Amino acid sequence: MSITMEEAIKMALEYESKVKDVYCEAEKQVTDPTGKHVVKVLANEEQDHLDYLKSRLDEWQKTGKVTAVRLESMVPTKVIIESEVDKLKDRMQSPSSHRDSELKMLNKALEVEMETSEFYKKMVDELTEEGQKLFARFVEIEEGHLAMVQAEIDYLSGPGYWFDFREFDLAGG
């Protein structure tokens, strides 16, 4: 059974609402100023996605067509984030006492971002060209969101890696 454009947009609204709720909750709990700023930017971006999708749904319901108007993002692309690792690393400081709750919230954010990203990829694969155009930009944006959240998690969890680069070597000093 194939999904209709209206169903796809409504499902996208549900995913975006869920992600926004996670970021709004995280904003209340995160104490690190940089982390708080990151989740606030992401919450605002998710609200922009909701507004965009609502406008696309309105257009679809009125005309039976949907125009993939350019969707902007405040979050850099995954490539840019990875190239700015050292700058981010210097700015991201969090007292260890707050790390567990922040990590829990960020892991939840990562989970819902991954679900949302997979949904958009599926829509690009399954919908007609009109739907593909609408949802392809969301795939790109979600990659940036995933990279930002993963960067925060990597730093707070201190696994010795930052974007797959070794921060230190216990054996080599």
Image: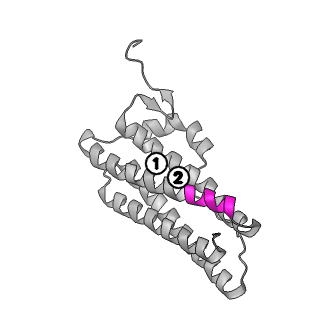
Say which residue label 2 marks: 145
Location of residue 28 in the rendering, given as x and y in whole percent from the top left corner = 31, 60
Query: Residue pushed farthest top?
Result: 172
Picture quadrant where residue 60 is located:
bottom right
User: Residue sitting at 46 percent across and 42 percent down?
Assistant: 151
Which numbered disc covers residue 149? 1
Magenta span includes 85: no
Q: Name the residue located 50 percent from the left edge and 52 percent from the top edge.
A: 114
Answer few, some or many: residues within 10 Å of disc 1's Cα (few below 14, many 20 plus, some between 14 and 19): many
Q: Are marks 1 and 2 in contact (CB under 8 Å)?
A: yes
Examine the image and state in which quarter residue 172 appears. Answer: top left
The quarter of the image holding the N terminus is bottom right
Q: Residue at x 50, y 47 (%)?
A: 148
What type is the residue that disc 1 sits on?
Val
Numbered range of the magenta stretch: 118-126
Q: How many marks?
A: 2
Q: CA distance from mark 1 to mark 2?
A: 6 Å
The residue under the point 72% across, 85% down is: 63
Whole-percent x and y of residue 22? Answer: 39, 61
